[in-house]
Structure formats: structure tokens, C-alpha cells
């Protein structure tokens, strides 16, 4: 008979519904049952695409004898970390405090009140290396609970105090005088230089294996490059002695970064690190060369062999990064190989999001790393790898090839990569024009992709986790909208898409389709929460239209607001998605601030969640990990609300644009304490600090001028009106056929041509 998990909204929990383990969900009733029986909680935390979660489930949770031991001596609890991230974070802190390391599956033993006293990750069915057997752990913990209860109580008391102190340690360590101001240009230069100290010149990225896609740091470096005048020099806006002018004069712009080596000049090194990192990822095996999209991380330093799960948030952040990269490359040279590669990544990733990671009304959470192989056994990467014999069907004439890496030694086949892209980028004597297309845009490579896609389609496909997570869904909507704006989205219902000149990227993509999907998904997400528009209770997730157990946290609210503001820039958005209106978004911003951000003695007090009725955890962690932290996500939302001119009332104050900017600076001030010491952990925060120095908005309705603004790396937001009052107090309107560039309350005269607009944006 299925256990309690059969009624869960989590696909991960439902996958354990037929285990012989009497799994319970995380509820007050579950803890009350443990107290009544006077046994510990055995809390198992994971997620649907976690490979080792599957392994432990098969080895232990499906075993009748193990299940009997668990059921007799514990109350077993299953938690999906993606549905309840605050509970996951609380127990992850406990695990790291006890063992010095973390990971999933997470195995926590706790009192009936939820206080942890022993923790680990994966435990094998028999002793292996330094790991005891899971049954040995169960017996030892049960004996300790029964025979040494005083020691358990002392341990939990110490742990509870320690976790409570950990929850506000970062905030308490901040100097009060530093917390109210965002970072200065000098501080951001130091943070970028510190990040580059960990850059890998041979293979791109930062640090060694395993390598995670550092997209938030890429966005930070691109913004620093623009701030340091890297793109202004292309428009005659930089001093004659700017390093980029020298690079142009020496004819090195086209291959700068192809060999990955830094120069010691910060502005050049920002561009080199971005080019090398994104080119290596785009040409490696971590990037799906057949269908698009990227995997969770690379097992090796070379980006060759992935851990095959595909997460929505990784692909959303990758799309945001390559759109930002394309804007920079287009400004530097609209005919360059680098731009061609960036636009290839935009098209393939945007199309992958829609084709493989979406449903009718939103983006799903993930695709599993494991699938059934030809023997019907579950195997990591089985859907993606090829034997040499299988690959031979695709031919050797195209760009794609198999990677022979020691990191893939346990796979049943080899990973497909496109490593010759790197050589092509660095070959100055190889032309690139209409008669000499990019290597991915030739018939032989198209044939390879079609053949390999057909082979893969005949295989068992990875499972889909179809939870719609508010934070991740919002990230993807923002990214898809930015891709649509870059490529030239048109008003819904009009014919064709106004695509800018491209450089031959295969599958250039349909900007109109991307934009309409983003609008539809954002409107559907809004409608799930509250049909009245009040959104009193944003939820963390939905599955099949049913809300999950978690309330939305700060990151959910902030990313939701950012998605709404970004979608509002699409042509026709006001008519297609009225819930993306300025008053609605301003109201959401006030609600977010009321729930999560307060002030005491002019210092912001930030909470990442609304607390849990069981543990009542309200921590604040500013570190950008796999996704932007709640704090840095809120900083972006507040920055965009200020640029939008979203003035509204909050309690006893008027929330003006100036007040919003003060809140933004207070949120970003927290990164002063970690920017230079740990820049890899605050990439999104540093990116927002870069944007906060000189936000630029372009006002107007002219389609051509708005398209130009959408492809300019200096532009923060595109609006229809300036948001600035004129002498009569009314908002300054933009004459038809013109655009106005505003920096704060300073706005330009209207301009009518693309050249005039580009000159304004270059200064």
C-alpha cells in the first residue's frame, strides 16, 4: 500500500510512495507522532534529479529489512529541498556544522521537536571505505537515543543555539556604517580582480574540478567591462589610450581571449575571461550539442563530461549571460565570430527552454540525470552518450565529435562535444562571412545533429520534474524575455519578427515565439496565486495546478517582480499582460518589502523566508549559490522598480524612486564584507552593484529605436514614458518616432535615428 507521499505535490516524494518505508511529510502532525512514540525523526532530504538520491533509494529505501528498521525505531520524513528550501538550508547548516561538508541526499536524525543531533549524506547498504552501512547508522543512532538521552539533549541544545547564531552571523558582522551604501567603482574593480585570481586560463571558468557554470560572475565581469569603457571605445567614446583602442589598432580584437591568457589589464581581462569561459562551455560536453541547454556541472576541468541533470535555473542564468555577452560583442564588432557563437547559444538555449523544459503554462524544474539504458537499468547519462559505432552513423565531416576523457570512464558511451570551435575562434586567417559560415552552420553539422537527435529519440528519456517553482520559473521568463528583446520581438498578433542582422547562428530562433511564451507564462503564474491581483500569499511551487507546501520566500517574490518588469518591456505587453502594469508591480514591491525587509536604526533587516510553523527559521544568507540569493535578487527588483518610476505608498511613507534606490543600496551594502574575499559567492550581488552605479533607461515607442536599445549593453530598462515630471508636474512624454535616454532624473532631448541613440548610450 502506498505511504503518505502518494498525496504529495512533489514528483520526488511521489517516487517514494511505494517504498516499504512508512514515509511521512513534513507536518506538525508528523512531529507529534514522533513525540507520542518517543522516537527520533529520520529526515531524508533530496530532489528528483539527484543521482545519489536515486542510488540510496534503490539500495536502502526499497529494501524490506531496512524499511522495517526505519519504521520500528524512527518516524521517517521525506522532504523535497526544492519545495521547502528554508528547511533544507536549516538542516544543511546543521550537516555542515557536524561534518564539515554538505550534499544530497541529506540524512538527518532529529528529536521530535526537529532539533538535529546526527547527520550525514549518502550511506551505502554495506560498509564502504570510510562510510558505515546505513543499517549500522540506524542501529547506533537508535541505541544512542534510548541509552544516552542526556547526551542527545545536550547536543541538540548546543546545535540549536549554534544554528540560531549562524542565522544572523553575516548581518551581525557587517559594519553598520558600511551597510547603507552600495559598492564604489574602486571596490568593484578589486572584486573583479580578486575573481580573476581564480580564473583558469587553460579551460576558462574559476577554480578546478568539478566546475559549475559561473554565469552570475560572467554577468558581473561583462558589466565591469562596460563600466571600464570597453564598449564605449567602439563608438569613439573612450580616451585614445584606452586598452581596447590599442587592441583594435593592433588587429587583436578578433582573437583576443581565444587562447584564454590574461594580460594584467583589468578591462581586457574581464572580456578575455568571459570569452574563454563561455566559448569553452559552449563547445564542451556539458553543453548539449544535439538539443541545446547545459547540464548541472562538469565533472572535469575541461567542461567535457557533465553531471547530466539539467536544471531550469542553470539554463535560465546561462541564457541571461549569453544575451548580455551578445550585446557586448555586437557593440565591439557586429560581424565577429564571437557574436556568432553568442547568438548560437541564445537561439539554442531559448529553444531548449521551450521545447524541453516547459509545459503549456510554465517552465518545469528539471530533467533527470538518469534514464533507462538498453538493458532497462537506470544509468546516469544513458540518454545522452554514444558509442563510437553509434556516432559513426552521424559521420565525421561536421563539427561534432566524441570526447575521450578519463572523467567519463564509468559511462556506457562517450559525450558529444564541439571542441573545434575554439580553434576556429583563434584562426585569424579563416574567413567568416556569408560564403564561409560558422562550423555549426554547415550542412555536415546539421546532418550530425539530426542523426544524433534521431538516435536519442529512440531511447528512454530522462524523467521530468514538472514542478513549477516560482523563483526558477521567473528566472526563465526573465531570460527568455531578454532573448526575445535582443533578437527583436514584435507585438503579439503581428506578422513576422523584426530580427536584427545575425551572423549565421544555426536555428536563429523565433523571437516572437519566445516573447509570447514569456508573456503567457508570467500571466499564468500570476493567475495561479490570486485572481484578484492582490497576491496575498505567493506560493513557492505548483504541481499540476496544486500549490506545494511552501510559501514563497524573498527570492520567489523578487524574481517574480523582476520577471514582470522585464516582460513589460515587450511590445504590446500592456494589452497582453495587464498584470504587468506599473501599479501592479509597485504593489508587489511593497508587499515584498513588508514581508521580508525591515529597518532598524537605518540598517536593513532582511529575512529570506517567512518562517516555518515547525522550526520558525527566518535566516538571511547573502551568498549567491546556484541561484541569486534573496538579498541580491531583491536588489535587482528594487533597482528595476525605481527605474520604472513605481511610486506608491508603504505604511506611513511614500515609496519614491529615491527611496527605492536607498533600499537598493542598503541591500547591496552587505556585499562590501565579502566582495573581495569571496567574489565567486556573490556574482549576482556584484552584478547589481555594477548596474547600480549608472542605470540607464530608454523611453519611447518607436520599434526600431527600442530594438537598438534592447541590444545595447549599457541599457537597464526600456519604458514608454520617461517617468520624469516636467515643469507642469506631468510626466514628460516622448514624441512619436523618437527616444529619450534618461539617467536618473536627467533626460536627453528626443532623438530620431539609431546613430543618435547609439552616441547617447556610448557616453
Image (cartoon, grey):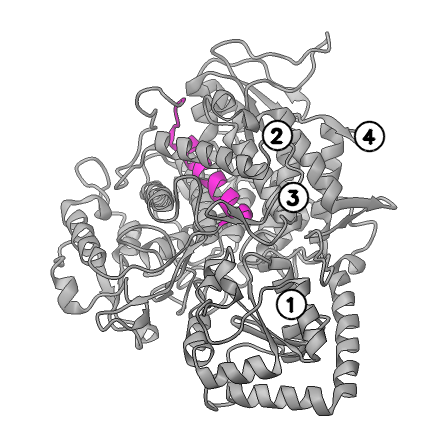
Total number of numbered discs in the rendering:
4
First in residue order: circle 4 vs circle 2: 2
Q: How far separated are the C-alphas under marks 1 and 4?
A: 43 Å
Placement of 680 over or under 178, stated as above or below: below
Query: Taking 515 as reference, is 172 left or right?
Result: right
Task: Residue at 26%, 53% (x, y): give it.
Answer: 290
Asked if one can make out residue 493 in the rendered structure from this viewpoint, the answer is: yes
Q: How far separated are the C-alphas under marks 4 and 2?
A: 25 Å
Q: Are marks 3 and 2 in contact (CB under 8 Å)?
A: no
Give the residue number, with chain letter if any, for mark 1: 30
Q: Which span is picked out in magenta?
A: 468-491
Give the residue number, with chain letter if any, for mark 3: 634
Q: Which mark is residue 222?
A: none
Give the residue number, with chain letter if any, for mark 4: 653
Query: Taking 96 as reference, is 260 left or right?
Result: left
Label 4 environment density (alpha carbons within 10 Å; few <14, some 14–19, many ≥20): few
Label 3 environment density (alpha carbons within 10 Å; few <14, some 14–19, many ≥20): many
First in residue order: circle 2 vs circle 1: 1
Is residue 571 or residue 577 the one in the foreground? 577
Asked if one can make out residue 381 in the rendered structure from this viewpoint, the answer is: no
Amino acid at each position: 500500500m502506498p505511504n503518505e507521499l502518494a498525496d504529495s505535490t512533489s514528483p520526488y516524494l511521489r517516487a517514494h510512495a511505494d517504498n516499504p518505508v512508512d514515509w511521512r511529510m513534513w507536518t506538525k502532525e508528523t512531529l507529534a507522532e514522533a513525540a507520542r512514540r518517543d522516537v527520533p525523526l529520520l529526515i531524508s532530504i533530496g530532489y528528483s534529479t539527484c543521482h545519489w538520491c536515486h542510488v540510496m533509494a534503490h539500495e536502502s529505501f526499497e529494501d524490506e529489512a531496512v524499511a522495517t528498521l526505519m519504521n520500528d525505531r524512527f518516524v521517517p520524513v521525506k522532504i523535497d529541498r526544492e519545495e521547502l528550501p528554508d528547511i533544507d538550508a536549516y538542516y544543511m547548516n546543521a550537516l555542515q556544522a557536524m561534518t564539515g561538508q554538505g550534499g544530497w541526499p541529506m540524512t538527518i536524525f532529529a528529536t521530535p521537536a526537529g532539533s538535529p543531533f546526527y547527520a550525514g549524506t549518502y550511506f551505502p547498504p554495506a560498509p564502504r571505505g570510510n562510510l558505515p552501512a546505513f543499517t549500522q547508522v540506524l542501529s547506533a543512532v537508535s541505541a544512542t537515543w534510548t541509552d544516552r538521552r542526556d547526551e542527545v539533549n545536550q547536543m541538540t541544545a548546543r546545535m540549536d543555539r549554534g544554528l540560531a547564531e549562524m542565522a544572523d552571523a553575516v548581518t551581525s558582522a557587517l559594519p553598520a556604517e558600511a551597510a547603507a551604501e552600495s559598492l564604489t567603482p574602486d571596490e568593484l574593480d578589486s572584486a573583479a580582480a580578486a575573481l580573476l585570481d581564480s580564473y583558469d586560463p587553460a579551460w576558462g571558468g574559476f577554480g578546478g574540478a568539478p566546475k559549475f557554470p559561473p554565469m552570475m560572475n560572467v554577468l558581473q565581469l561583462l558589466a565591469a567591462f562596460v563600466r571600464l569603457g570597453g564598449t564605449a571605445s567602439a563608438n569613439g567614446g573612450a580616451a585614445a589610450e584606452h586598452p581596447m583602442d590599442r587592441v583594435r589598432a593592433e588587429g587583436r580584437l578578433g582573437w583576443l581571449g581565444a587562447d584564454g591568457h590574461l594580460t594584467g589589464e583589468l578591462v581586457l581581462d574581464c572580456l578575455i575571461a568571459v570569452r574563454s569561459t563561455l566559448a569553452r562551455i559552449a563547445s564542451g560536453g556539458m553543453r548539449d550539442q544535439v538539443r541545446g541547454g547545459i547540464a548541472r556541472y562538469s565533472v572535469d576541468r575541461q567542461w567535457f563530461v557533465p553531471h547530466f541533470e539539467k536544471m531550469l535555473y542553470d539554463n535560465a542564468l546561462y541564457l541571461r549571460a549569453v544575451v548580455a555577452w551578445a550585446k557586448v560583442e555586437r557593440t565591439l564588432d557586429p560581424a565577429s565570430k564571437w557574436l556568432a557563437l553568442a547568438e548560437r547559444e541564445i537561439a539554442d538555449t531559448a529553444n531548449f527552454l521551450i521545447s524541453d523544459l516547459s509545459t503549456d503554462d510554465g517552465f518545469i524544474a528539471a530533467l533527470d540525470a538518469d534514464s533507462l539504458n538498453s538493458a532497462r537499468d537506470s544509468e546516469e547519462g544513458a540518454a545522452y552518450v554514444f558509442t563510437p559505432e553509434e556516432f559513426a552513423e552521424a559521420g565525421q565531416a561536421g563539427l561534432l565529435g566524441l570526447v575521450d576523457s578519463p572523467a567519463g570512464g564509468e559511462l556506457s558511451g562517450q559525450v558529444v562535444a564541439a571542441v573545434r570551435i575554439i580553434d576556429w575562434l583563434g584562426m585569424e586567417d579563416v574567413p567568416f562571412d556569408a560564403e564561409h559560415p560558422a562550423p555549426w552552420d554547415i550542412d555536415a553539422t546539421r546532418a550530425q545533429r539530426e542523426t544524433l537527435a534521431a538516435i536519442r529519440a529512440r531511447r528512454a528519456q530522462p524523467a521530468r520534474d514538472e514542478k513549477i517553482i516560482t523563483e526558477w520559473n521567473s528566472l526563465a521568463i526573465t531570460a527568455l524575455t531578454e532573448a526575445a528583446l535582443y533578437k527583436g520581438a514584435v507585438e503579439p498578433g503581428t506578422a513576422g519578427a523584426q530580427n536584427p542582422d545575425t551572423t549565421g547562428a544555426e536555428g536563429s530562433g523565433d523571437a516572437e515565439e519566445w516573447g509570447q511564451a514569456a508573456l503567457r507564462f508570467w500571466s499564468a503564474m500570476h493567475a495561479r496565486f490570486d485572481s484578484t491581483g492582490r497576491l496575498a500569499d505567493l506560493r513557492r511551487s505548483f504541481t499540476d495546478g496544486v500549490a506545494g507546501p511552501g510559501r514563497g520566500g524573498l527570492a520567489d517574490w523578487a524574481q517574480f517582480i523582476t520577471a514582470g518588469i522585464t516582460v513589460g518591456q515587450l511590445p504590446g505587453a500592456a494589452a497582453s499582460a495587464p498584470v504587468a502594469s506599473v501599479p501592479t508591480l509597485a504593489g508587489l514591491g511593497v508587499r515584498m518589502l513588508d514581508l521580508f525587509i525591515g529597518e532598524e536604526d537605518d540598517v536593513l533587516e532582511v529575512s529570506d523566508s517567512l518562517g516555518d510553523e515547525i522550526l520558525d527559521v527566518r535566516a538571511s544568507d547573502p551568498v549567491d549559490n546556484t541561484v541569486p540569493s534573496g538579498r541580491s535578487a531583491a536588489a535587482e527588483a528594487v533597482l528595476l522598480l525605481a527605474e520604472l518610476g513605481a511610486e506608491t505608498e508603504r505604511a506611513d511613507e511614500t515609496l519614491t524612486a529615491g527611496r527605492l534606490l536607498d533600499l537598493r543600496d542598503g541591500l547591496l551594502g552587505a556585499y562590501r564584507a565579502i566582495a573581495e574575499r569571496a567574489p565567486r559567492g556573490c556574482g549576482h550581488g556584484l552584478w547589481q552593484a555594477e548596474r547600480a552605479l549608472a542605470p540607464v533607461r530608454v523611453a519611447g515607442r518607436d520599434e526600431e529605436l527600442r530594438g537598438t536599445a534592447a541590444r545595447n549593453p549599457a541599457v537597464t530598462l526600456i519604458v514608454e514614458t520617461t517617468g520624469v515630471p516636467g515643469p507642469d508636474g506631468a510626466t514628460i512624454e516622448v514624441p512619436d518616432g523618437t527616444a529619450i535616454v534618461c539617467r536618473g532624473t536627467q533626460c536627453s532631448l528626443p532623438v530620431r535615428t539609431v546613430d543618435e541613440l547609439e552616441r547617447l548610450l556610448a557616453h
